[in-house]
């Protein structure tokens, strides 16, 4: 008799699931992928699903990101002028995700969204506003990003004698990353598509952010 799916125990198993180390049916694979299953990045079915859903996610989730900051236009020129800043912020997110492997796309996106709102308030009113959050993981991500921004300003101070990085530049960079994250994640609870993208940009052994001459090939416009 044909073997049944390990998850539903009803339908016929047809594909090996590396998350449960057993064979499951295509329906359970589609329904439980990144919902109840901690799908490893190398799973071919996960990779196929990401490619298939990419265009749809970019259309729907991108609109959500723009709705949060509807007045923000990020010209391509800004990406070239502030590519090192964007890379630095991306590196900070990747570093946070490597330090805590339980982090999902939604954790990074929530932290970036909270920071962007804080900087939006700072730019518009000069008031420092930090949205309250009880999520310790999100607080840690935010601190890592803020540490990077502080270090970036200190580097500018050391090189040119003053820090020219404006809060409005940080805000634009954060909104850019927010839209990128929303455009890459599947939106499922356990999605790590954005996390995997960041890991690919910054290999684990890399400790120094690439210089501006390499940055152009790393920034991907969502």
Image (cartoon, rainbow, N blue to C red):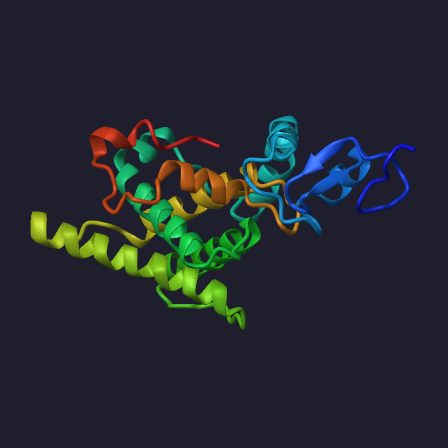
Closer-to-camera residue (72/29): 29
Closer-to-camera residue (114/52): 52
Residue drawn at (85%, 46%), measured in percent from left and top?
8
Closer-to-camera residue (148/123): 148
- Residue 71 seen from this side: no
Q: Is residue 96 above or below residue 127?
A: above
Q: Is residue 159 left or right of residue 103?
A: left
- Residue 35 seen from this side: yes
Q: Is residue 184 left or right of residue 93?
A: right
Rendered-image quadrant of the N terminus: top right
Residue 114 lies, in percent from the top left, at: 49, 59
Residue drawn at (48%, 58%), measured in percent from left and top?
111
Closer-to-camera residue (69/200): 200
Q: Is residue 124 above or below residue 84?
A: below
Residue 143 lies, in percent from the top left, at: 37, 64
Residue 200 sits in which quadrant? top left
Residue drawn at (49%, 65%), measured in percent from left and top?
137
Residue 162 sits in which quadrant? bottom left
Residue 26 lies, in percent from the top left, at: 78, 33
Circle count: 0
Furthest toward the front, the residue is 1
Residue 106 lies, in percent from the top left, at: 57, 52
Q: Is residue 128 above or below residue 80?
A: below
Residue drawn at (15%, 52%), measured in percent from left and top?
155
């Amino acid at each position: 008799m044909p073997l049944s799916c390990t998850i539903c125990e009803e339908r016929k198993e047809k594909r090996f699931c590396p998350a449960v180390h057993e064979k499951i049916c295509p329906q359970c694979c589609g329904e439980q992928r990144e919902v109840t299953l901690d799908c490893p990045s190398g799973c071919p079915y996960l990779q196929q699903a990401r490619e298939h859903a990419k265009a749809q996610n970019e259309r729907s989730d991108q609109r959500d990101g723009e709705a949060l900051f509807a007045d923000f236009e990020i010209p391509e020129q800004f990406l070239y002028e502030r590519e090192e800043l964007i890379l630095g912020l991306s590196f900070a997110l990747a570093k946070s995700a490597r330090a805590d492997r339980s982090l999902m796309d939604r954790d990074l996106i929530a932290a970036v969204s909270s920071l962007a709102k804080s900087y939006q308030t700072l730019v518009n009113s000069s008031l420092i506003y930090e949205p309250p959050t009880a999520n310790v993981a999100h607080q840690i991500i935010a601190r890592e990003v803020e540490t990077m921004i502080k270090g970036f300003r200190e580097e500018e101070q050391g090189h040119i004698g003053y820090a020219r990085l404006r809060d409005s530049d940080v805000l634009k960079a954060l909104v850019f990353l927010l839209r990128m994250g929303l455009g890459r994640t599947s939106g499922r609870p356990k999605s790590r598509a954005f996390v995997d993208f960041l890991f690919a940009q910054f290999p684990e052994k890399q400790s120094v952010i690439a210089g501006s001459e390499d940055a152009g090939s790393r920034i991907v416009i969502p």
